[in-house]
Image (tube, coloured by chain):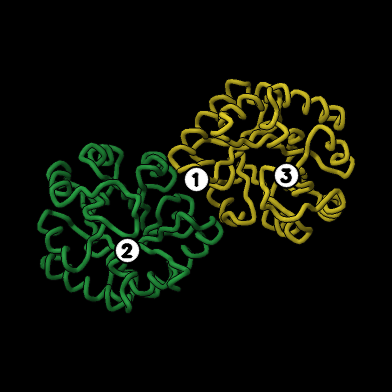
Chain colours: A green, B yellow
Amino acid sequence: MRDLRLGLYIITHEDAGIGYGHLDVARAALDGGADALQLRGKEICGRDLHRLALRIREMADEGGGGCLFFVNDRVDIAVAAGADGLHLGQEDMPAVSARSLAGEDMIVGMSATTVKEAERAREDGADYLGVGPVFATPTKPDAVAPIGIEGLRSIREAVDLPIVAIGGVDEKNARQVFAAGADGIAVISAVTAAKDMREAVRRLRSVVDACLPGR
Amino acid sequence: MRDLRLGLYIITHEDAGIGYGHLDVARAALDGGADALQLRGKEICGRDLHRLALRIREMADEGGGGCLFFVNDRVDIAVAAGADGLHLGQEDMPAVSARSLAGEDMIVGMSATTVKEAERAREDGADYLGVGPVFATPTKPDAVAPIGIEGLRSIREAVDLPIVAIGGVDEKNARQVFAAGADGIAVISAVTAAKDMREAVRRLRSVVDACLPGR
């Protein structure tokens, strides 16, 4: 199993109405000291996604490479941009096919909501799991019902892969999530809803460091 | 330049309301004698698109391999399914990046509406052009204004790549399109709007054969 640092994992988002975009979230994540950053733009055309991915790769490299860069869903964009990793949801291309395209060096994460999905992801060669939604979240109002801390714990007991908890995780409930065995927290709203996104990342960084003193 | 047979190029579509799907169009294309078949499912999740692409690859192989199989937009799905080719729109990943992922054997087509786009596609290494919309089409009501036979002819004069004309092309206007120098016609509605899709492909096949007697 790889030794991955995924304690604070920020996922990009855009909201043209409010006026922030994927690059703003990426900048905040890098400046605020995130361990991982995922470009997730299901609504974006391939051309723009490719451009964003190349730009974020540059930004991450300029930041010293301490933050792992993941691309959601699109194996082709991940490879073309030289991403460190790829994140696959249950509706994305199967992990085995993705791995054969992306190569052994690519970190492959998979979303899992149930123990069955988590075990399947492990069999399919996932390097880590995105587990959730743990709590309800405004970013995905149509997501499946939250699995709660109990659901997270049951997946933690079933598989030994690194687990990044996702779905409504914030400064306040992060301790609970780590106490249930998560290795990291993945956040969108906890950053994008903040007035100062960089400051929000820094505060989350402190919480994660307090919860994972050995890392 | 590759010697490509693209005279009759069918693009898949689905309409759950009417009750046909991508595989129905693919089956009709193969049975009716199309030269090329493109899976285009912008609305489909990666998992389903991957599954459909693998199935169409099998169907095309069972049909003897005389029909080239293309995947729209997704380089990763095209490679994973062993497609013969990849079709890129102006909003998709740049052709140069796609080619470096897909390899030299992959046939790469690009959409072009203007002479400038066509020339750029040629520079970027496209193997053929999808040129249009030539006429108005019900499949893409929000598409750009039709370029007409004149627009097609101006692109024909500007670049020497194989040209597949798209957009409202049907049995009745196909002759005009070939007379303007197209090497093939790409159709969606002319097949999917027919009561018998296989029969519609066969009739188009006859028209194409009459227009391209040397092929």
Q: Please, is residue A103 above or below residue A63 in the view? A: above
Foreground disc of the pair 1, 2: 2
How far separated are the C-alphas under marks 1 and 2?
27 Å
- Residue at screen point 55% across, 30% down: B57
Q: Secondary structure at mark 3?
A: loop
- Residue at screen point 28% across, 63% down: A187
Residue at the disc numbered 3 = B137
Q: Are marks 3 and 2 on the same chain?
A: no
Type of residue at label 3? Thr
Residue A72 position by quadrant: bottom left
Foreground disc of the pair 3, 2: 3
Give coordinates of residue A71: x percent, y percent.
Answer: 40, 57
Left or right for A45, reference A155: right
Seen from the viewer's position, the closer of residues B156 and B103 is B156
For residue B67, say whether it is visible: yes
Output the chain of dot 3.
B
For residue B164, say whether it is visible: no
Q: Are marks 1 and 2 on the same chain?
A: no
* Within-10-Å neighbours for mark 3: few <14, some 14–19, many 20+: some
Seen from the viewer's position, the closer of residues A17 and B44 is A17
Give coordinates of residue B123: x percent, y percent.
Answer: 71, 58
How far separated are the C-alphas under marks 3 and 2?
40 Å
Q: Are marks 1 and 3 on the same chain?
A: yes
* Within-10-Å neighbours for mark 1: few <14, some 14–19, many 20+: many
Residue at the disc numbered 1 = B76
Output the chain of dot 1.
B
Residue at the disc numbered 2 = A188
Q: Please, is residue B76 above or below residue B83 in the view? A: below
Residue pushed farthest front? B17
Q: Please, is residue B99 above or below residue A185 in the view? A: above
Left or right for A180, reference A58: left
